[in-house]
Every structure is written in C-alpha cells, then in structure tokens.
Image (cartoon, rainbow, N blue to C red):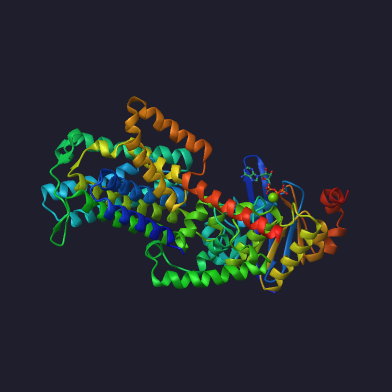
Amino acid sequence: MSALLEVNSVSRRFGGVEALKDITFSVHGGEIFSIIGPNGAGKTTLFNLLTGVFYADEGSILFNSHDITRKRTFEIARLGIQRTFQNLQIFLNMNCIENVKTACHTRISSGMISGCLRLKKVIQEERIVEKWAMEALDFVGMKDLALAPSDTLPYGLLKRLEIARALAAKPSLILLDEPAAGLNDTETLEMRHLIESISRSGITVMLVEHNMSLVMEISHRIMVLNYGQCLKLGTPTEVQKDPEVIAAYLGEAAG
Amino acid sequence: MRLVGLYIFLAVTIGLGLLFPDNYYVSVVGSTAFFHIILAVALNLFMGYAGQISLGHAAFFGIGAYTSAILTTRFNLNPFVAMSAGAMLTGALSTLLARPILKLKGHYLAMATLGLGIIVHIFLVQEEWLTGGPDGLSGIPPIKIASLVVDTDIQWYFILCAVSAMTIWISLNLMDSRMGRALRAIHGSEIAAEVLGIDTASAKAQVFVLSAVLTSIAGSLFVHQQAFISPDSCSFAFSVELVTMVVLGGLGSTFGAVFGAAILTFLPEFLVHFEELEVLLYGAILMCIMIFLPKGVFVSAVDGVMHLFQRRCVRDVGSS
Ligand SMILES: Nc1ncnc2c1ncn2[C@@H]1O[C@H](COP(=O)(O)OP(=O)(O)OP(=O)(O)O)[C@@H](O)[C@H]1O
Ligand SMILES: [Mg+2]
C-alpha cells in the first residue's frame, strides 16, 4: 500500500486556540481512515486544511505526491479530493440532479460563451452529465428523487445527496464529516453500507464520526485527536484498548 | 420544453405588435418594456443566478449609450460599429474592475458598485466637452438595417422584441450549462462550489462582464431609439429600478426578470390616472408585493401552481 495522503507536522491556530498541533500521519490508498475525538478537538479543522478552506500555519500536506499545502480549494478539488460538510452545504436553490450535475464541473470543459449559445459541445456535455448524475444518485439510492427540489428533502436524504454530489466529481479521496450525525438507527445502518460501498468502489475514505460502533466496525485505522493533538493512531482494537484514549474520549462516550 | 417560455413570449409580443401596431401602450410603452426586459434579464444573470448584487449597472448602460452617441455624431461611425466599440469598452472596464470588486460580498459589494455608478454619472455630468454635460447629446442618427432606416415606433418594437428574445434565449441556455450551474452553485453555497472544483472568483468575474456587456448593448440601442441621451438616463435611481425589477419578478428566474421589467414599465403608465396619488400607490404596491410574495411575482405564481397541481395529484392517489 502506498501513501495517498501525507500530512507532515501540520499546525493551525485560531487566535489563542491551537486547533491542530504538530499533526503527522498518512493515509493509504483504499483504506477507511477515521478521525475521532471530543468536540473542538480539531477534526473539522483538519478537513478544512486538507481542502484549502484554511491554510496550515506550519507543516506540509502532500496528496498523490502533489504539494497541496498552499493550493486553493478548487485546485485541490481538481486533483481529486472531495468532502461533505458537518453543517450540510447543499445548493438549496437547485433540485437534486442539478446539485449532482454541478459536481461534474471538472469532468467537462465548456465555457460561459459556449453555454450562452448552446453550442453542439454543450448539448453533448449535457447528455453525458445527465448520465453521470443519475449514476451517482442511483449509487446513494436517490434515483427517484432526481427532480425533487432539494429544499423539501428531509435531513437524512440531504446527507445522502451531499455524498452523491461529492461522488459525481469522481474523487480518489473523500472526506466525510459526521455523515451519521442526526440519523436514526436505520438510517445509520444504511449510511454504513453506503460508506462501505464507496470504499469498495476504490475510493479512499476519511471519516470523522462520533458514532463509535460505526467507526470501530468499518475503519481500517483510527486517529484520536484531543485538543488539537494526536493522542493515538492505530487499528480499532489498539485504539479501544488505549488507556489514554479511554480517559480522554471513549470513557466519556461510553458513559 | 426548455424554451417553452420563450415561445410563449414571442407569440404574445409578436401577436400584440401585429394586432395593435398603432396602440401607444404596445409600440411606445412596449418598446420601453423591451429595454427593461433586456436589462433585467442581463442583471439577473449576475444577481439572480450568481447571487451577487450590483447597484451600478446604469453605469454600463451609460457607457454603451454615450459611446454610441459620441462615435456616431462626432465621427460618423456606423451605429453597429459604435455599438461594438461601446461593448468592448464596457467589457474592458468590467474585466478590470471585476476581480477587486467581486472580492467583496453583500453590503460591501453593493457599496462598491454604487460607487462605480456614481463615478460614471459624475463623469457624464462634468466632462461637458465629451458628453454634453447635464444637457446630454442629441441628434443621434437612427440605425439602418440593410437599406431600411429604423425610425418608426413599431419598427423599434419588433427590433427590440428580437433582441429581448435573444437575451432571454442566452439566459435560458446558460442556466442548463456547466458555467450556469457553477453560478447558481455560488449562489447556493460558495464554499461547496469551490470544493467541487469551481473557480468561483473567475466565474463571478465572467458573469459580471457578460451582464455588463449586454447592458451596454441595450444602452447603445437606447440612444438610437431616443435620438437623445442625458445623464438622467444613467443615474443611480435607474440602477435601483433595475434591481427592483429583478427582485420583484423573482430572483434567479429568467422569466421572473421579464415579468418584473414588464410590471415596472406598465404600472406607472396606469397609475398616471391617479394623479397626485401616483407615487404613493406605486410605492405601496411594490411594498405589498414584496411583503406578500417575497420570492417575487413570477416565482411565487409558479410555486403556487405547482403546489395546487401536487395537491391534486396527492388527492387523486389518495382516492384511487
Ligand atoms: N474559523 C474558526 N475561527 C476560530 N476558531 C475556530 C475556527 N474553526 C475552528 N475553530 C476552533 O478550533 C477548535 C477546533 O474546532 P473544530 O471545528 O475543528 O472541532 P471538531 O473536532 O470538528 O469538533 P466537533 O466534534 O464539535 O465538530 C475549536 O476550539 C474551535 O472553536
Ligand atoms: Mg467538526
């Protein structure tokens, strides 16, 4: 297994808060790599650094041997990293399939003028984008809702839609920020199957999640963050046995 | 199906033009409505699609109008050459301004575009040697298509009808294309758009320029129709009126902009009969529309019809 993502001694401060302190790890192609830790541990901040939403104060990030430490968000996306958001960022002004079609942006190339004049190229693109978008919706089981306005969907479906959208961009690495938060037991189980099928389709998954049984059952490796520091990095069994982790997080989560 | 609205628009406007060519409300007010439709649809690309705001679009209208006026009166240039020159000047200026201005958001963007509008207006009033100052420029020649001189109201009606239809066509095309989706995504969530690989700064700049150039072309046509231009036609008030049209009809919908433009053109014509109450009623009607139909007249109406339709479907399913 080769390292798809390498994070080297990355730190990030917000004013006085050290959101991430000297974090080093790498993610291998094909694995499900989870990040857990109490609220405010820096999990979302890590995703923000990986997608160029914020920049690291120190350290470097390598993806597919490209240095992405200072790259802009849309450039990183074009290299093949996609993410979902803890606080959903669906385009509520579009219906489901339009949301997903938007994600095909980097897979097609027509410009604004061609679009305005609806050149032949645009018509061809629209046909193929329609197909890609339906495939992505089908993958998350939302094919029938293609034309539903997104602002009428329940929360659980919006979470799926956001994943479908990320998948339509054909990423090699997907970052899921609390995909099961706010879902009931059935929905959580469905989400687990979805994450597993994403992984099976060859996409590397990084997962932030508070639902411990989900994390422990599907992750290959887990990194535990606490106050911006890496407390432990290992397999689910190793992490569960670690006394420091139990004291800082698992004990509290279990109790 | 995609262009159904456009066909209806063409059927109605061409029908009216053929049936009532001498009616004041058709040929004269109708032509003004077409100008407003072109301008509102162009502004909607920037405001409704991309979710930005401009309180300075009258500046681009003025640049197109004055470039055409000056080049055709002083240099005897062909009106279409002058129009292209105006469009290029507007394109260059808006390209130059787009990046720095569009870094701003919300109120700050409104302030910056407002400033642009005011600067251009002051320039038009002050630089008398070039622009004729507050009195403006007159004696602007009509346009000629082949050997036909366009100077009657109904000729203008049909020409502006064609240009409106083209603008609507462009707007509808853009909606269902790669960059059109990118713009609407920026409106929905700028951060999510970036994460999907959209260069949001560039997309916003491009649509700003597109919108400005269309506005400039409308300005050029306007001076030839009126044979006259003064700074009053490109004032801050006009920018606000354009924004009102877009919002009134329904932000983000091409036909919302069309309806908004039509309503704001015809409403004052009918309120004239109320004499001193005119302005009061005008304001009251706009306020009521925004309070009771916050999504705009057209979008609310479409939503309403869809709702009724869905309810009927549900009832049918329930009873079967
Ligand atoms: N944009 C920001 N500005 C200021 N402080 C921030 C910002 N983003 C994060 N922080 C701070 O950084 C720390 C880590 O936040 P982060 O959102 O990464 O936590 P998290 O692990 O995702 O928590 P949760 O489980 O609640 O989502 C917190 O103290 C937070 O207040
Ligand atoms: Mg978080």
Q: Nearer the viewer, residue A132 or B29?
A: B29
User: Could you say which quadrant of the image residue A14 lies in?
Assistant: top right
Q: Residue furthest top?
A: B276
Residue A64 at least partly seen: no
Q: Nearer the viewer, residue B64 or B127?
A: B64
Q: Position of residue B188 (x, y in %)?
A: 54, 51
Q: Position of residue B121 (x, y in %)?
A: 27, 37
Total tally of numbered discs in the picture: 0
Query: Quadrant where the C terminus of chain B lies?
Result: bottom right
Residue at 34%, 40% in the rendered image: B116
Residue B254 at least partly seen: yes
Q: Nearer the viewer, residue B61 or A13?
A: B61
Q: Position of residue A114 (x, y in %)?
A: 38, 65
Q: Position of residue B51 (x, y in %)?
A: 47, 48
Q: Nearer the viewer, residue A188 or B116?
A: A188
Residue at 38%, 60% in the rendered image: B169
Whether A225 is drawn above or below A193: the answer is above
Whether B299 is drawn above or below A7: the answer is above
Whether A205 is drawn above or below B314: the answer is below
